[in-house]
Each structure stands twice: as structure tokens, then as C-alpha cells.
Amino acid sequence: MSADLGWDAMWTNVHLATIDQAIGSADGYGSIRDGALAVRDGRIAWVGPRRDLPSGWRAETEHDGGGAWLTPGLIDCHTHLVHAGDRADEFEMRLAGASYEDIARAGGGIASTVRATRAAGEDQLVAQSAVRLGRLIAEGVTTVEIKSGYGLDTANELKMLRAARRLAIACGVEVRTTFLGAHALPPEFAGRADEYIALVCDERLPAAADAKLAEAVDAFCERIAFTTAQTARVFDAAKKHRLPVKLHADQLSDQGGGRLAAEYRGLSADHLEYASAESVRAMAEAGTTAVVLPGAFYFLRETRLPPIASLRQHGVPIAIATDCNPGTSPCTSLLLMLNMACTLFGFTPAEALAAVTRDAAKALGIEGEVGRLAPGRRADFALWNIARPAELAYAFGANPCVGRVVRGIPDAAHADAHAKR
């Protein structure tokens, strides 16, 4: 550590769930009771037990955490948060017996949201999406991934990505944008999927890259979307533009999506209910993170579980996300996803918290920046009025968040009344 012990801010009277075994205890959370955390220049400068604070330290502002637990800021690493309209009618259709594939093939599903999103102006998209994002932020989310994919033409895909970037500024949250031009086949290209993929590769993806509006490229590889060969063409185009890839993989059937994502050293393969043992092994070798989405599993009443035991056995990092979208997971509660991951997928509460911090950061390629409480990491964290970290996964429907800090600055909505200057 630098000999300069002058810090911008200090949090004391807190318990820390560092999610960092190099710093904390071996309880799965990296817990430090009666801890302290110092910030300088928007990054964590010191973290540890308060009794170990170096002598002579000073901070411009001291925050009394009031005995709260302090964790890394939560990361929602898979969302379709920017969109217009809803699909409550399709929810009713599914309850009456229609399948997701039935609805999609009849012109509903993603195509329905495409029509609504194309009709909305950029300001409308920002205003509607800010409401959804605000709910995530209220639960301690400091980083969120937002995909395009409801425009499916150049102008509207870029409109979605611009709206996502504007949300970051308007809402005080880190937004990672993903180009998802290969989300579905737009109606005007019915029967011409290869021609549409050519446009994605030759025009739409380059436009997003040239405008610097995307940090990654995604695709939907499935029977109702695009083949592995078509997806590979998109990934080849992403590689030309030096953009990492991720994939909606093996959600409804085994298309070898997990293996394909691994072949391209993808950041993540997401969903994975039907992923094969071969795909899991390939992901482990490539360092590709698995992102499981219990909200979509629940909402679609899926019965095939993701291969959690196999992913664990092969050491594949597993992240959790809301998959916030109007058709299959209209959810804006990452805390609820923690509970669902435990009750539906067999996660422990400690695994679930790591899955929305450390492993979610890896799924976005930013594990060196966020996801753990460690010196040098960005000072993004949340404070919780809980007695132990397991409560975050235990009490579904509750929101014990009492503070959120982004780059060392406390959220105005959670102003610290005990700050001393």
C-alpha cells in the first residue's frame, strides 16, 4: 500500500462480505466482522478488520455504516431491459396451454416486442426503461448489462444501444452494452435467414462497432432463431471488430451452443438448460462463464434443469442474472433471482451471492474491475440491513438495501446521515 494514508472516504462499523478468499474468511462469503473499507480516487484503497487499520490513517469523509453488511455492488449480467410494450397477453396464452415456440411461430414472441420498440422514440425508450432500471438499482445493483435485439434493423438497433448508454448517465449505474442483432428473424426477412445474417455481419454489427456502442456481441442459437453455422458467421464478424462474444445457448434444445461459445472463447454461454456434457467440458477449457437464468426457467415452467452439478464438477464459473425481458422473464429483482437459484437450482446462498458479484463480473469480462471487495477494484458496493449474508437469498420479496455506492460516491437515494467531515 502507498505510504500516503490520506483517503477520500472511509466506511467503518460495517461487516464485509468481500467475496474474496484472499482477504476474507473461508465461509464462502469472505466475511470480515467489524471491518473497514477506504476509498481513494473511486477505487478501494484498503479493506480489512477495523482493528488492523494502519496508524495515522485519515479520510476526508467518514461514514458510519450502522452495523450494516457491505458487499460488492450487485451485477445483473444478462438483461434485455431496453424495450417498449409488454407481452402480458402471451402470458395468458401460455397459461392456456400454448408453448413459447407456438407463440413465436405464430408471429408473437420477440417479433411482438420488435414492433413496439421500432414504434417508440429514443426518449420514450429511455423513460420506460429507467423505471425498470430503477428497481434494480434500489436492490443494490451497480452494474447492468443491456442488450439490443428488439430493433433488428440498423437504425433501431443503434437507437436501443444509445438509449442504454443514456440510462447509465441518467440513473448513475455502470451499463455494459451488447449488440444482439441476431436475436430473431424480423418478419420482413421471413424465409431468408442467411440473407438477414449477412446484413447483421456486413452492416449492422459494423455500425454498432464503429459508433462504439457495444462492448460485446450476442446471438440466439436455437431452433426458433439461428443455426450454429449462422451464429458462427456473426461471431466471425465480431472477431473482426475485436468484440468479445456471448451466446443464448441451449435454452430450448441442445444445439451445441455452449460448445460453440467456447470455440470462440466467449465471455459467457447463457441459459444452458439443454447443454451437453461436451459443451460443459468445452466451456471449462475455454474459461467461458455459465450464466443461468432462473426467472426464465420459472416463467416458462421449464422442467429441464441447467447442468449445475456438471458445471461445478468442471470448475465452470456460474453467474446468475434476471434476464429482464418482456416475454420470458419480466423481472426487475436480482435478489429474487438469488432465492430462485437456491430453491430451483440448488445453489447455496454463498454461491448465489458470488454469482451476482464475482462471477457476474467475469461473465462481462470486467472481473479485474468489480465483483469483489479488494484493493484496486472500483469502489462499487452496497450496504444491507441484515444479520448475515444468507438473508439476501433467504427472504424473497424483501429489499434490505440501505446504501449503494458507485465509484466511491454514495447514492443520493441512500444518503448517509452519519457522514462526518
Image (spheres, grey):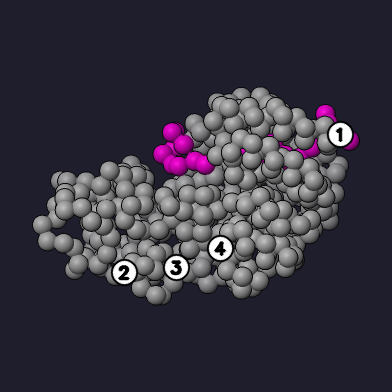
The numbered disc on residue 32 is: 2
Residue 255 position (above or below residue 176):
below
Number of the label disc, if any, that sits on residue 391: 3
Give the structural element (helix, strand or loop) at label 2. strand
Mark 4: secondary structure: loop
Which residue is at a point 31% across and 62% down the rendered structure image? 68
181 on left or right of 94: left
Which mark is first along the chain, 4 or 1? 1
CA separation in Å, label 1 and label 4:
37 Å
Residue at the limit of the structure toward the left, as seen here: 56
Residue named by callout 4:
317
Side of 57 where 28 appears, left or right: right
Residue found 43% across the figure and 48% down from its top:
142
What is the distance, in whole Å, between disc 4 and disc 3 at their CAs? 23 Å
Mark 3 surroundings within 10 Å by alpha-carbon count, few (fewer than 14), some (14 through 19), many (20 or more):
some
Q: Quadrant of residue 315?
A: bottom right
Q: Residue at x 23, y 56 (%)?
A: 1
Tell me how far mark 4 sits from mark 2, CA to CA. Answer: 24 Å
- Mark 4 Cα-neighbour bin, 10 Å: few <14, some 14–19, many ≥20: many
Region in magenta:
168-192
Labels 4 & 2 near each other (Cβ < 8 A) = no
Query: For mark 1, what is the residue?
Result: 192
Sequence-first tag of 1 and 2: 2
Residue for point 61% across, 58% down: 286
Label 1 residue SS: loop
| Residue 129 in view here | no
Amino acid bearing label 4: Pro
